[in-house]
């Protein structure tokens, strides 16, 4: 496979498109788009969000010690993109985009009602990374849209329709087809193993 | 939107399916599947991989100070899944899965030839997270499949066909349709803003 070297840059691994909702000391809500988001631990359940340290979202997380990471469904790509273009210092992004903040159960930051998955987090610690801060949040509670649960308790990811972001090339993509089941499909290679 | 509370758990934000390739002190290569991967900074370009601290991959990264993060295309879902099921302590996963290690340009860890994007990293630091370690890697070089580049220099993400992993529900998904262009589609909300 012929390849081209790009040098050191930020690249386009598929990442989640999320809205990070926060609250300021005075009680005002804000929201911004983030795709540099990852689950990083089960012990305890923890996620990271990397934020530019000049962002209002970062200031509010430090001030109030909490935030909510909301999954963006594909149909809200435009709204999510808007929330990445403007700053909450200048605009009421929730009002302009029509997104609805609702009360969370464990933290003061709001859930975004239109998002099918909301993850309530408390600030655990942060790691400075040049102009960015890697914010580690302990997951305290998760809200998932009821319509996605089947009678057997299984979850239909199609109901969430999560929007994927490809950084570097700056494209939003929807999910296509189920391509495999983890912890199962790889077992077909066991037959080719030698030894015990 | 009616929702169900799941309690604190690891959830299914879309994450990249990657193969992390490493080299041990003795020169033997290993590879494992990782989806807790994220770009986290541009200053300098940095990514994170969260690894269970008992993994051979983690041991080799600490021993040799480098690793490569390889993008898994949808057609290699089974091979990638296999590399998450077994340990390199017991098996030669590259040989069993038929994946080909090739020489990188800046680090001793190998690229995986069949992966359309390879990101060479040097270990910057790590953050302990219970049973896991969040490994921060400075991106030193990136190799991208030549066939994805158009005459205008643009990149066709469809050629990469990156495999998305939904943790929690343990499903691999391919990408579907282009759902939007970032830093552009949100501008349609500007007309609804008030004030300057």
Image (spheres, coloured by chain):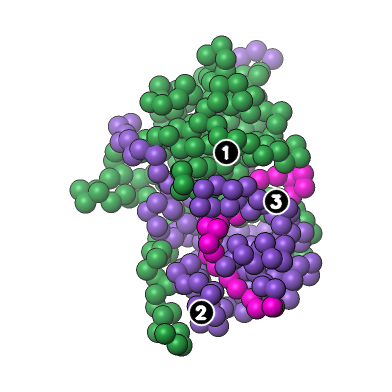
Chain colours: A green, B purple
Say if the magenta span includes residue A118. no
Magenta part of the protein: which range? B26-55
Near-viewer residue (B158 or B34):
B34
Estimate how packed mark 2 is, as few (under 14), some (14 to 19) or many (20 or more) residues with alpha carbons within 10 Å.
some
Query: Which residue is located at x 53 percent, y 75 percent?
Result: B89
Q: Nearer the viewer, residue B65 or A144?
A: B65
SS under mark 2: loop
Q: Residue at x 68, y 58 (%)?
A: B155
For marks 3 and 2, give the CA distance.
Answer: 28 Å
Q: Secondary structure at mark 3?
A: strand
Q: Residue A136 got which mark?
A: 1
Q: Measuring from the top left, give residue A104's x and y in whole percent.
A: 41, 25
Name the residue tied to disc 3.
B125
Using the image, name the chain to which the residue with label 1 belongs: A
Give the chain letter at badge 3. B
From the viewer's side, name the closer residue of B110 and B17. B110
Q: Is residue B114 left or right of residue A145?
A: right
> Mark 1 to mark 2: distance in Å?
34 Å
Residue position marked by numbered label 2 in the rendering: B91
Q: Quadrant of residue B22?
A: bottom right
Residue B13, image x, y percentages:
47, 47
Q: Residue at x 52, y 14 (%)?
A: A27
- Quarter of the image that includes the N terminus of chain A: bottom right
Left/right placement of residue A63 relative to residue A42 reads right
Q: Position of residue A123 (x, y in %)?
A: 55, 32
Q: Main secondary structure of the magenta part?
A: strand
Instruction: Say whether residue A122 is visible.
Output: yes
In the displayed structure image, the side of residue B178 where residue A192 appears, left or right: left
């Amino acid at each position: 496979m012929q390849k081209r070297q790009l040098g050191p840059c930020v690249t386009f691994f598929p990442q989640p498109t999320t809205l990070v909702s926060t609250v300021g000391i005075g009680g005002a809500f804000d929201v911004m788009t983030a795709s540099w988001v990852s689950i990083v631990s089960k012990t305890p359940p923890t996620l990271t969000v990397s934020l530019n340290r000049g962002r209002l979202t970062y200031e509010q997380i430090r001030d109030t010690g909490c935030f909510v990471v909301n999954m963006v469904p594909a149909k809200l790509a435009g709204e999510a993109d808007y929330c990445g273009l403007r700053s909450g210092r200048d605009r009421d992004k929730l009002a302009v985009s029509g997104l609805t903040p609702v009360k969370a159960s464990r933290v003061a930051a709001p859930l975004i009602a239109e998002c099918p998955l909301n993850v309530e987090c408390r600030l655990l610690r942060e790691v400075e990374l040049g102009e960015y801060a890697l914010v580690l949040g302990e997951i305290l509670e998760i809200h998932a849209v009821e319509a996605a649960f089947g009678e057997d308790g299984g979850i239909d990811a199609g109901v969430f329709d999560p929007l994927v972001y490809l950084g570097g090339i700056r494209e939003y993509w929807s999910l296509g087809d189920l391509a495999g089941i983890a912890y199962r499909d790889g077992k077909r290679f066991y037959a080719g193993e030698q030894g015990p």
